[in-house]
Amino acid sequence: MKQDQANEELRIILSHFYLKGTGLEIGALHHPLPLSNEAHVQYVDRLTVNQLREHYPELNDVKLVDVDIIDDGEKLSTIPNNSKDFIIANHMLEHCVSPITTIESFLSKLVSGGTIYIAIPDKRFSFDEKRELTTSEHLIDDYYKKNDHFPHFIEWVKFVNKIESPAQIEQNALHLYTMGYSIHYHVWDYNSFVQFLFSTQKFLKGQFDIMNITFSDFRSEIITILRKK
């Protein structure tokens, strides 16, 4: 318990140090990031709270944050450009079809000097353990919309849902794909995520600085802080 509290304190320390002003948290569900009194947040999700409870029945017994803005977190189409001081994406980037496009979208919504707080699970310590690491080349192809995403659902059903029958794998993957279930499209460990950040920084022509990359034992996650130039 003390270790869990210490690791949660790391999130608090980073958020209190880097996040100030007005911003957004995307997909907070039941675990919003603790913020200081200097930070004021609106919660963004693609679904209403009632729809989220239908989509994630496993969360029926926990309190979800009130969703302030219904929007696609990868695009944030309803948010004016250059209008927010920070954006929080905890355990959201791995759900994105194109993480590079998502980071580019975040940057467009931030004021100069605005901050992105990202946490992702390290696949070595999660149900993604047996999945292949996502390469930077694959993510660039995602950016240019070259990839078919259905194979991600096949991989999810096979390694996360642990279904072995080829017919059932196909059937379950198609069901999740059709309903728009939010799987982990991409998986990283610490080293591959660091590589992704630096390759994305180069690909986006240095639009952001990498302020911090930390591995946290809490939820075995990697936390990074990016700052818009």
Image (spheres, rainbow, N blue to C red):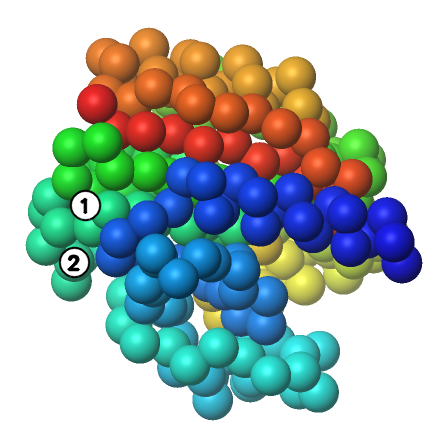
Q: Are marks 1 and 2 in contact (CB under 8 Å)?
A: yes
Q: Give percent across and percent down for residue 217.
A: 78, 40
Q: Give percent across and percent down for residue 220.
A: 75, 41
Q: Is residue 30 visible?
A: yes
Q: Give percent across and percent down for residue 158.
A: 77, 48
Say what secondary structure mark 2 lies in. Answer: loop
Residue at numbered disc 2: 79
Mark 1 neighbour density, 10 Å: few (under 14) some (14–19) many (20 or more)? many
Report, in whole angstroms, how far the alpha carbon at label 1 lies from the one at label 2: 7 Å
Left or right for 76, reference 171: left
**Mark 2 residue type:** Ile
Say what secondary structure mark 1 lies in. Answer: helix
83 or 158: nearer the eye?
83
198 or 143: nearer the eye?
198
Q: Residue at x 28, y 42 (%)?
A: 106
Q: Is residue 188 visible?
A: no
Residue 129, quarter of picture: top right
| Count of number-bearing discs | 2
The C terminus lies in which quarter of the figure? Answer: top left
Q: Residue at x 71, y 87 (%)?
A: 61
**Mark 1 residue type:** Lys
Left or right for 209, reference 164: left
Q: Give percent across and percent down for residue 78.
A: 15, 62
Q: Which numbered disc, 1 or 2, marks the residue that appears first in the sequence?
A: 2
The disc at residue 92 is none
Q: Residue at x 20, y 42 (%)?
A: 110
154 or 105: nearer the eye?
105
The disc at residue 109 is 1
**Residue that extends furthest to the front in the rendered view of this protein:** 37
Residue 134, quarter of picture: top right
Mark 2 neighbour density, 10 Å: few (under 14) some (14–19) many (20 or more)? some
The N terminus lies in which quarter of the figure? Answer: bottom right
